[in-house]
């Protein structure tokens, strides 16, 4: 029978990883390490996207350094891969930033707050998530303060990492089943989170029905608000609806039963986010027990994770929608009951509910003390996600009890936020100062 390491041995394994990467070495960033131009990497990530929407993605990236950061995961993935890493691997969000957490309805109807975007999820070094979320805290602090906020950003990052480290230590001492059951409390006392929960409370399926559809003879159909929302004609809608049969098989049997009680009414195409702009994103409007019982499903195209090329152990094949769904289930305490995957015309898609009791954080919500409080809670949620999908004992062994790791992550976050601003300015220059002005930078 193979030896299964004890918790003490696993903690020692984590501590030994400090020889591979000293904790203070996480503060390192130098653009001279780069082997590729980040704008080339972003250009390449546009291949296969809807051509008419590429300008819109660049427009959203040009809006601010934080907007650029949201759309530049391929560049940051390449940058992180240049640095030595711990080799302590768990499921990572991959696109951890302050706006990729939000409120949503759990299967039992309760509103919960957690990481809620997993398009880039993959098994990778735990610190990659921390470095990305920490950088987003610095960029958010700068944006809400009009370009300043250096001290406030550093304070938020230190709180974030300290919170992560403390909860990892707590979870490393709990019975395994209690780690699986662990819930983060006090969410209502953090103003940005309580605001998101209030938004989620109002975001009912009937509210989505009013926002997304309009009355026509014979019933309601999707509105036409190009380029962000348009109704598909029957020929375009047919393959989307046909794909729901394969999607249904990815659900648990009892959820298949509930889905079978809904009938398809209409199909639309919707633009969402920043990094996802240009990917095919369909929305299906279904009706259950009458017109006051709508269900909206998002059928979202999933290319491979931007981190996959840099992780040798990652399987080359596999359904990308399934990658996202299973990564989400691994990290979240409670996931969308209608989370699954399907395929349309050889493209792979994630399927989930759209806007069912969902509420997001806005950058403006993170002013003053709100950012620091929010950062502390982000640390707890990320720690829980990593412990659920990895080994809290190894993580605790590596992190220890001191402040070296937190100080290093804060140093990296400031440096990489500076780099993001440089790259954003380069994109502005390359595109003539606006998303529609000038062609993409020449190679």
Image (tube, rainbow, N blue to C red):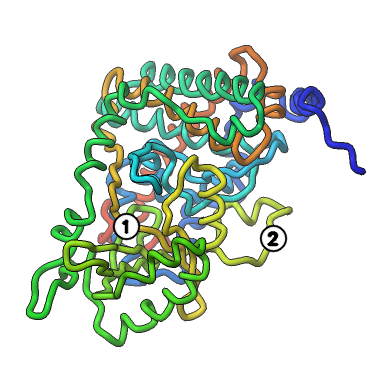
Q: Nearer the viewer, residue 134 or 166?
A: 166
Q: Position of residue 373 (x, y in %)?
A: 36, 21
Q: Position of residue 38 (x, y in %)?
A: 50, 50
Q: Which mark is residue 354?
A: 1
Q: Nearer the viewer, residue 174 or 221?
A: 174
On the picture, is 4 further left or further right than 30?
right
Q: Is residue 443 visible?
A: no
The quadrant in which residue 270 appears is bottom left
In the displayed structure, 202 sits above or below 177; it is below
Q: Is residue 24 visible?
A: yes
Q: Which mark is residue 325?
A: none
Crowd rating for badge 2 (residues with CA inside 10 Å; few <14, some 14–19, many 20+)? few
In the displayed structure, 139 sits above or below 266; it is above
The quadrant in which residue 98 appears is top left
Q: Position of residue 362 (x, y in %)?
A: 27, 37
In the displayed structure, 87 sits above or below 39; it is above
The quadrant in which residue 430 appears is bottom left
The secondary structure type at the circle numbered 1 is: loop
Q: Nearer the viewer, residue 243 or 228?
A: 243
Crowd rating for badge 1 (residues with CA inside 10 Å; few <14, some 14–19, many 20+)? some
In which quadrant is the N terminus drawn?
top right
Q: In percent of the image, x 29 and y 31: which residue is there?
A: 143
The secondary structure type at the circle numbered 2 is: loop
Q: Position of residue 27 (x, y in %)?
A: 59, 25
Q: In percent of the image, x 25 and y 78: which residue is there?
A: 232
Q: In percent of the image, x 12 and y 75: which residue is there?
A: 219
- Disc 2/disc 1 C-alpha distance (Å): 29 Å
Residue that badge 2 annotates: 315
Q: Earlier in the sequence, mark 2 or mark 1?
A: 2
Q: In percent of the image, x 26 and y 28: which residue is there?
A: 144
């Amino acid at each position: 029978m193979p030896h299964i390491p004890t918790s003490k041995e696993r903690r020692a394994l984590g501590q030994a990883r400090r020889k591979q990467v000293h904790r203070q070495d996480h503060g390192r960033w130098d653009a001279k390490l780069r082997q590729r131009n980040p704008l080339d990497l972003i250009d390449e990530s546009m291949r296969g996207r809807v051509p008419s929407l590429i300008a819109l993605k660049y427009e959203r990236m040009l809006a601010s350094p934080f907007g650029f950061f949201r759309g530049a995961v391929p560049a940051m993935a390449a940058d992180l891969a240049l640095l030595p890493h711990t080799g302590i691997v768990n499921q990572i969000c991959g696109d951890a930033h302050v706006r990729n957490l939000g409120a949503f309805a759990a299967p039992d109807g309760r509103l919960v707050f957690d990481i809620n975007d997993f398009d880039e999820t993959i098994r990778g070094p735990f610190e990659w998530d921390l470095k990305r979320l920490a950088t987003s805290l610095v960029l958010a602090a700068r944006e809400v303060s009009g370009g300043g906020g250096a001290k406030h950003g550093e304070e938020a990052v230190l709180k974030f990492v300290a919170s992560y480290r403390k909860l990892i230590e707590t979870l490393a001492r709990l019975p395994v089943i209690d780690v699986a059951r662990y819930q983060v409390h006090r969410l209502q006392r953090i103003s940005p989170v309580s605001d998101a929960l209030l938004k989620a409370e109002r975001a009912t399926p009937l509210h989505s029905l009013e926002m997304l559809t309009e009355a026509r003879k014979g019933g309601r159909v999707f509105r036409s608000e190009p380029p962000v929302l348009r109704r598909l004609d029957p020929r375009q809608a047919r393959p989307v609806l046909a794909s729901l049969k394969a999607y249904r098989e990815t659900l648990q049997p009892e959820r298949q039963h509930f889905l079978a009680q809904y009938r398809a009414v209409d199909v639309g195409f919707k633009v969402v986010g920043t990094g996802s702009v240009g990917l095919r994103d369909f929305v299906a409007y279904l009706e259950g027990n009458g017109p006051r019982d709508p269900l909206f499903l998002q059928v979202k195209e999933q290319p491979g994770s931007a981190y996959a090329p840099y992780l040798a152990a990652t399987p080359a094949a596999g359904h990308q929608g399934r990658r996202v769904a299973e990564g989400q289930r691994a990290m979240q305490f409670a996931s969308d009951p209608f989370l699954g995957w399907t395929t349309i015309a050889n493209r792979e898609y994630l399927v989930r509910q759209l806007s069912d009791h969902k509420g997001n954080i806005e950058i403006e919500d993170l002013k003053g003390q709100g950012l620091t409080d929010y950062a502390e809670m982000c640390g707890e949620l990320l720690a829980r996600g990593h412990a659920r999908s990895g080994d809290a004992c190894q993580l605790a062994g590596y992190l220890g009890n001191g402040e070296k790791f937190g100080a290093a992550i804060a140093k990296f976050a400031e440096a990489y936020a500076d780099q993001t601003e440089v790259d954003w300015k380069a994109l502005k220059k390359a595109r003539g100062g606006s998303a529609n002005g000038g062609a993409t930078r020449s190679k």
